[in-house]
Amino acid sequence: MEALDALLNRVSTARLSDPAPTAAQRDVLFRAALRAPDHGQLRPWRFLTVEGEARQRLGTLFAETLQAKQTEPRPEALDKALAMPLRAPLLVVVVARLQDHPKVPRDEQLLAAGCAAHGLIQAAFAQGLGAIWRTGDFSYDRHVAAGLGLADDERIIGFIYLGQVEGAFRTPPALAPEDFVSAWG
């Protein structure tokens, strides 16, 4: 796929099925992620892969987190939390590793990790894989972060769900650049 085609036509895909990306496809995904802009070459990111039985364990972690936050969570909310990681054969947790640095603020490092996530989903689309970047309350919860083994200076950027597209990629809406771009001064 041409680079501009991927940039202009990538869409999120919520309906994903087996099989998970191959080892060769994953290599490309992570190589693309590692090309994110990186002031100071801090590489303020890392990635956790979740697949197979680990998806059920992540669902259990989500349900435990929900139970800790709510005195009596609705049974359907618990079921949803348990099922969330099962929506794709592979999840990648994108983690920002925030470091103290005299020239690179933590906010910039967080943005760099977000760019790494973007590179990963762009590479998925370019390879014909489906991907969707999900966040939500669990992404910002310290109990979830601790359950995933994150250090205090690490933050979840999001959960990227990856798999085969069920059906076909949808056509993205046409957006006019002039609706978003203006001259200053």
Image: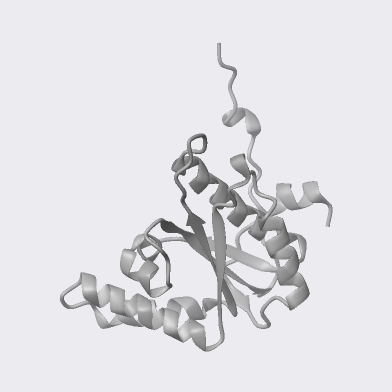
Please report the residue visible at 70 percent of the width from the left and 64 percent of the height from the top: 29
Query: As drawn, which residue projects farthest toward the top?
Result: 185
> Vertical placement of 52 versus 137: above or below?
below
Query: As drawn, which residue projects farthest toward the left?
Result: 71
Give x and y (percent) for residue 121.
64, 59
> Vertical placement of 13 versus 98: above or below?
below
Give x and y (percent) for residue 161.
56, 69
Please report the residue visible at 50 percent of the width from the left and 84 percent of the height from the top: 54
When asked about the image quadrant of residue 145, the answer is: bottom left
> Vertical placement of 80 versus 5: above or below?
below
Q: Quadrant of the N terminus?
A: bottom right
Give x and y (percent) for residue 6.
75, 53
Give x and y (percent) for residue 36.
65, 49
Q: Quadrant of the C terminus?
A: top right
Q: Work out whether residue 103 can be spotted.
A: yes
Please report the residue visible at 43 percent of the width from the left and 73 percent of the height from the top: 148
Q: Quick check: 1 left or right of 38?
A: right
When asked about the image quadrant of residue 154, the answer is: bottom left
Q: Quick check: 20 left or right of 49?
A: right
Q: Nearer the viewer, residue 76 or 56?
A: 56
Q: Nearer the viewer, residue 105 or 8?
A: 105
